[in-house]
Image: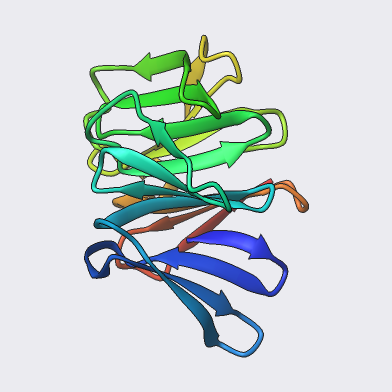
C-alpha cells in the first residue's frame, strides 16, 4: 500500500494483477488498474506509481509507461523518495537512481528474509526482517546500519513499515497481529 494524498491510497493486489485506488474517507474503490503480471511492492512519488511486477520489473504508471530495469530478479518491495528508488529482495537492499542505475547495495548474512522498506526525511532506509524479528535502518549513503527494533521490543514477524514524513513517525506492524509500533 502507498499513500497518494490525504484521502487516497493505492493498494497492490498481488495475484489478482490489479491495483486499487481507494478513497479512505469513503472507503470506496475509485479506480482499478490492471497489471501485466502479479503486482507486489508499490510506491507513489511525484504523480507516478512505481509497481513491482512478477518480481522482475518495475512499471512506472505514468503517461509514458516507462519500465525500469531492476538490480535483482527477486524484488518484493519498493519505495521512491526524492530522486531514488529503494527496493529489496529477501537478502539485499538496493538504492538506485530513478532510471535504474545502482547507487549502493546493502547485504548482511543475518538478514535473509527482508519484507518491506521505507525511507525517512533524511534518506535513511528502514526495512523489516521477518524471521529475525528486526527493523534495520541503513544510512542515506548505504555505509552504516543498526538494528532499530528487535524481538525484545515486541516485534514478532514484522511486516508492514511506513515512515510518515509530515509527522516524522515510523510505523511498524507485525504480521497477522493488531500491534502497531510508533517511533518518533
Q: Quadrant of residue 81?
A: top right
- Left or right, 124 with reference to 145: right
Is residue 31 something that shows in the picture? Answer: yes
Where 8 falls versus 1 (above or below)?
below
Q: Position of residue 131 (x, y in %)?
A: 22, 41
Q: Quadrant of residue 20?
A: bottom left
Task: Kindly identify the residue that appears in the image at 68 percent across and 33 percent down.
Answer: 82
Q: Position of residue 102 (x, y in %)?
A: 45, 16
Residue that protrudes farthest toward the top in the picture: 143
Task: Kindly identify the residue that appears in the image at 58 percent across and 53 percent down.
Answer: 63
- How many numbered badges does the structure rendering display? 0
Task: Kindly identify the residue that appears in the image at 65 percent across and 37 percent down.
Answer: 120
Task: Kindly identify the residue that appears in the image at 69 percent across and 46 percent down.
Answer: 184
Residue that protrudes farthest toward the right in the picture: 166
Q: Position of residue 176 (x, y in %)?
A: 30, 67
- Left or right, 10 with reference to 176: right
In this view, the residue in front, 113 or 37, is 37
Residue that protrudes farthest toward the front in the picture: 64
In this view, the residue in front, 148 or 16, is 16
- Left or right, 122 with reference to 98: right
Where 146 falls versus 59 (above or below)?
above
In this view, the residue in front, 90 or 63, is 63
Where 115 falls versus 98 (above or below)?
below
Amino acid at each position: 500500500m502507498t499513500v497518494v494524498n490525504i484521502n487516497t491510497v493505492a493498494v497492490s493486489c498481488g495475484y489478482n494483477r490489479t491495483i486499487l485506488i481507494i478513497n479512505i474517507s469513503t472507503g470506496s474503490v475509485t479506480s482499478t488498474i490492471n497489471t501485466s503480471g502479479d503486482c507486489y511492492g508499490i510506491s507513489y512519488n511525484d504523480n507516478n506509481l512505481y509497481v513491482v511486477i512478477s518480481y522482475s520489473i518495475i512499471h512506472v504508471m505514468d503517461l509514458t509507461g516507462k519500465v525500469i530495469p531492476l538490480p535483482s530478479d527477486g524484488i518484493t518491495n519498493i519505495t521512491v523518495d526524492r530522486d531514488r528508488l529503494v527496493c529489496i529482495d529477501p537478502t539485499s537492499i538496493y538504492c538506485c537512481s530513478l532510471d535504474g542505475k545502482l547507487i549502493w547495495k546493502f547485504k548482511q548474512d543475518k538478514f535473509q528474509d527482508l519484507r518491506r522498506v521505507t525511507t525517512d526525511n533524511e534518506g535513511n532506509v528502514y526495512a523489516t526482517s521477518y524471521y529475525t524479528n528486526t527493523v534495520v535502518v541503513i544510512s542515506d549513503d548505504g555505509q552504516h546500519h543498526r538494528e532499530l527494533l528487535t524481538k525484545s521490543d515486541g516485534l514478532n514477524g514484522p511486516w508492514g513499515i511506513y515512515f510518515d514524513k509530515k509527522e516524522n513517525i515510523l510505523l511498524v506492524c507485525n504480521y497477522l497481529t493488531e500491534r502497531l509500533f510508533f517511533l518518533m
